[in-house]
Amino acid sequence: MPERSHSKSLILRGIPASPGIGIGKAFVFKEEALSYVFRALGRDEVRKEIQRFRTAVMKTRTEIIQSRDKVLKVLGKSHAALIDVHLLILEDALFSKDIEKKITQELMNAEAALVAVLDNIGRTFSKLGDEYFRQRKDDIMDVGKHVMRHLLGHTGVMLSQLSERAIIIAHDLSPSDTLSLKEEFTEGFATDIGGRTSHAAILAQGLEIPAVVGLKDITSQISTGDLLIVDGNEGVVIVNPSMTTLENYRKEREVQLAQSRELEKIKDLPAQTKDGHKVILASNLETPEEVKAALGHGAEGIGLYRTEFLYLNRTHAPTEEEHYENYRSVARQMLPYSVIIRTMDIGGDKLAPMGIDGFGDEPNPFLGLRGIRLCLRYPDLFKTQLRAILRASVEGKLKIMYPMITSLEELREANRILAEVKRELASKNVPVAKNIEVGVMVETPSAAMIADLLAAETDFLSLGTNDLIQYTVAVDRVNENVASLYNPLHLAVLRLIERVITAGHNAGKWVGMCGEMAGDPSVTKILLGMGLDEYSVAASAIPKIKMILRETSYEEAKKLAEEVLRSKDQEALMKRLSNPKGA
Ligand code: PEP
Ligand code: MG
């Protein structure tokens, strides 16, 4: 139950998804109900009705172009391409001609003609049953909705058109919704559903937007215009705060900003313990736009480049050239550091139109055709990405990492395809860097249990704890109902992590971690003591983790890790680790 701190204000508790404090007016993002009435026209009204329809189309066009320009400015070309699709639909003769024909010949008012044509298109596309066409249909319906709003004189705001700073309140934000949030206008966001490691939460961290998820029914408790505080550190949203609360939070925000500025001072110092043990502190990347923040916070490389953004918010899989341009640019910008490109991990909570029949209709997408499974099932898709990575490899220091590996066979099959692509490029005299490191994400319990075998056949291992935790403790990472069971400190998880690090080291390979756990300050020392070689974290988390590492001695950390691993009482361990002095 929400708590009322006084008559008007309300405190809602959820799951902290992205740190920081946001203060501002709420914008409740809800699908609008666009109801219209059917009206039979007199012959003499046709011309005026067509004019009315054309005006609505014109207004929609202006609106789409405006949002395209904003997206282009903030998020770059690849995201603006989504909006181009909407313009093309609007300008498609079939769309407008059919509607005007209905107005003229069947004497329908514009709203009814629009709905009739949309229904028709919807039925035709549904019959095709292909994911590509389903996405296409959604785009057409979206454009139709814009036109309908103008016909009805509604001026509701769409997420991508937000033009003043606000806190976005939504039932859910998909990774593609989150990508369309513009940093400059987003003070924070809060959603009904979701978990700490849902991809929307991870994107929010990348964009440094404070966020709270899993609030259950915030959309029904808040109205657009309510004054809100989003506390992404504690996972709390305060609605219509008292003057005192507001003042306290403003001060706290200032303190946190001052602390971050203080932490930035160690940006160029090594990630090294008091007794000289050095580790690599790298950054995760969700979009190429984040490279600047990674370098700005002192990242010594990219430990995980999630390439899925290339596939989201569009109607078809990206071309080899798009992949290539992207990787080349990131590789160059990150020199002299290396960039680990994770081959696409579409599936789970990240669905994209891949032109594959039935894809996306799975009852358990996290246990379905995801990551390397999808790549091995559709090798052409995989080869396109691998070719682009290999071509870009001469422009910087690129490494390749496969997601969702569960067996040695998958690793070998992926490597076989990689070797094939290398041979094809060599036969065409396309230059490729020598000795590109290839690693495996250890994010399934099966991979963790055979980490020794995987390590023997790869150059490195990287612990993907977001998934490793969900699969080990059987807790869906995006389900707020079981979020309290999603425990990185579960002894099963800690034991698996230690096992993987030891297996990697025994095979002479380095072991990193690129799940959110790597950026959690409460476990930094334990991971250090277990021997983790590389931490790859959200750019904004780098200074804090570096500070902890620099204040710790490796010898102390090893003792702590040993004690933790010997622990026989989960509850006592949790208590001890929640008290920072204890760790
Ligand atoms: C992970 O699972 O920990 C990981 C880093 O991959 P993702 O969050 O993209 O699934
Ligand atoms: Mg993962």
Image (cartoon, rainbow, N blue to C red):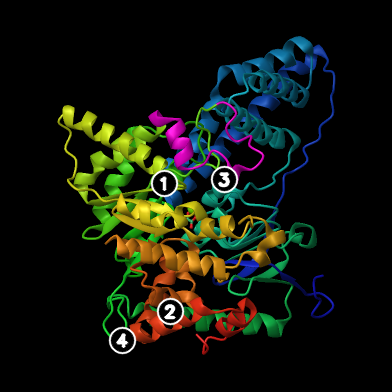
Residue 228 vs 472, above or below: the answer is below
**Could you tell me residue 480's position as x and y percent?**
69, 60
Q: CA distance from mark 3 to mark 4?
A: 41 Å
**Could you tell me residue 391's position as x and y percent?**
24, 39
Q: CA distance from mark 2 to mark 4?
A: 12 Å
- Which amino acid does the dot numbered 4 rest on? Lys
Q: Residues within 10 Å of mark 3 (few under 14, many from 20)?
A: some
What mark, if any, has residue 66 been given in the picture? none
What mark, if any, has residue 525 been given in the picture? 2
User: From this viewpoint, is residue 273 visible?
Assistant: yes
Furthest residue toward bottom: 581
Q: Give whichever of discs 3 and 4 has the lower sequence position.
A: 4
> Mark 3 or mark 2: which is in front?
2
Considering the numbered disc 4 on the image, is that residue within a helix, a strand or a loop? loop
Task: Please name the residue shown 66% across and 80% down the image.
Answer: 246
Q: Residues within 10 Å of mark 2 (few under 14, many from 20)?
A: many
Furthest residue toward top: 105
- Which amino acid does the dot numbered 2 rest on? Lys
Q: CA distance from mark 2 to mark 1?
A: 30 Å
**Could you tell me residue 148's position as x and y percent?**
71, 33
Residue 512 vs 567, above or below: the answer is above
- Which amino acid does the dot numbered 3 rest on? Gly
Q: Disc 1 marks which residue?
A: 307
**Could you tell me residue 89's position as x and y percent?**
56, 26
What mark, if any, has residue 274 been given in the picture? 4
Q: Disc 3 marks which residue?
A: 348
Q: Which residues are magenta?
A: 357-380
